[in-house]
Amino acid sequence: MRLLVVGGGITGLAAAWEAARGDGERPPADVLLVESSDRLGGKLHTEHADGLLIEHGPDSFVSYRPAASRLATEVGLGDDLVGTTGARVVYLRSRGKLRPLPAGMGMVLPTRLGPFVTTGILSPADKLRAGLDLVLPRQLRDGEDVAIGAFLRARLGGGIVRRFADPMVGGIYGAGVDELSLDAVLPSLRADEAAHRSLMLAALASGRKTRAAGRGPGSPFRTLRGGLGSLVDAVSGRLVEAGADLRTGTGVTELRPSPSGGVEAVLGDGTVEAADAVVLAGGVASSAALLAVPAPEAARALSGVPLATSTVVTLCYPASAFATPVETHGWLEADPAPISGITVSSAKWAGRAPEDAVLIRAFVPERLGEIALAAEDVLLERVVDHVGTVLGARQRPTLTRVARWQSVMPKYTVGHPARVAAAEAGLAHLPAWRVAGSALHGVGVPDCVADGRRQAGIALATSTSVSS
């Protein structure tokens, strides 16, 4: 059995690993992975410079979705999994000030009433309006996907949307909550309204249950001691040991069904490779282009997933640039700003910078407008000025990096579940062809790992049943 994987990001690597290692019921498969760029890892890209560990893409993942931790452990990095350091002090910049997130605050709703009532992030009028949720009737209708922002605004008012939901949910998904799909991004809110009627009552009940179970408020974020790039290196190294064929600088220009029910791939150098199954993990644009002829309905559905540009700006300052130590893990912006938030990597993670340095990651998603698409020098100047002003920096950073990820961030806008269903239905006639990655089933590192492995397993199982 041979599996072709198109795309060498973490999704494609996870798919290749699932195939190459086999499982209790399926023997290891031969694997060919092709990646058009000159390196593996995709958005997982770690740089080591001047004693700094710089992440150009994601820098961590959540522990309550175990796929990334499991993969790291399987490839020998279990002892390198680390959590955050120090006290988890996170702020929202709201109404002109950095204000700590209220204890027990989730992405949208409070799980404790007292800290929510006393927080300065919301105005008194915002809190009163949010309280109306306690008496409002249910808002959602079965089968109707709606924007998160519209739903929350109807139940809780604009303050919650502007000060919590948009910075926190929009910061993860790269889009404003007024365009993000409730059923694709926060389906739990539909279930909460159905079960409790009031979202506030549902959140408070969840908080009581969590505290009764003895689960503390610690950070769910984990990373690897050597950066997420070390996961790419470890997986690719183990794949080579297992005999997988990993080719960089090689694109796929055409896919076509083979007479045996598998796939033939025409590579950029003109060679043709045959496989029994294929996992497309090269992103929306790549997958849609390759499916345009053999599976036009699936290609059309994938092309309907909008893509956004996201930029990570890294700044390193000497610790002496600040009058007081920078100990916060970062903040999110609820006020107009040229960034959506920052992470202070040197405070959040051990070993990211020397003790006399402050390492900061600032995020500039496309939803911020013109600044996100500005020339690099203009973008950098605005970010440096803003971060320096908020933190009171007395000098400019001594090192800067700009990593711009152009049109690669899928946006789960209203109607996304229907697009997912259409993409899968459009591949029904090619059961050993699978699409994996952030385009359809989740944008986080654990989501991509889990989906890559799942789709590889389905492709190989389907291919086996077809061939037998």
Image (cartoon, rainbow, N blue to C red):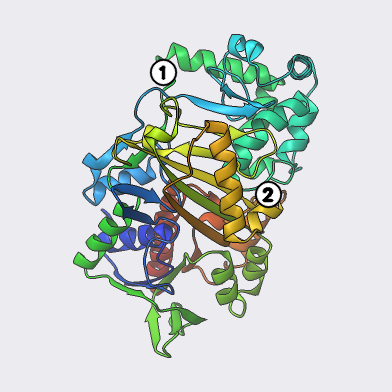
**Residue 451: mark in rendering:** none
Disc 2: which residue: 367
**Within the image, what quadrant is residue 267 found in?**
bottom left
Q: Quadrant of the N terminus?
A: bottom left
Q: Residue at x 54, y 51 (%)?
A: 441
Label 1 SS:
loop
Q: Quadrant of the C terminus?
A: bottom left
Q: Nearer the viewer, residue 464 or 273?
A: 273
User: Furthest-top residue in view?
Assistant: 114
Q: Residue at x 77, y 29 (%)?
A: 158
**Within the image, what quadrant is residue 467 found in?**
bottom left
Q: Is residue 31 left or right of residue 5?
A: left
Which callout, 2 or 1, points to the residue nearer the camera? 2
Q: Position of residue 6 (x, y in %)?
A: 44, 70
Q: Amino acid at mark 1?
A: Gly
For residue 241, above or below residue 250: above
Q: Would you call the spot at circle 2 few (<14 residues within 10 Å), some (14-19), or many (20 or more)?
A: some
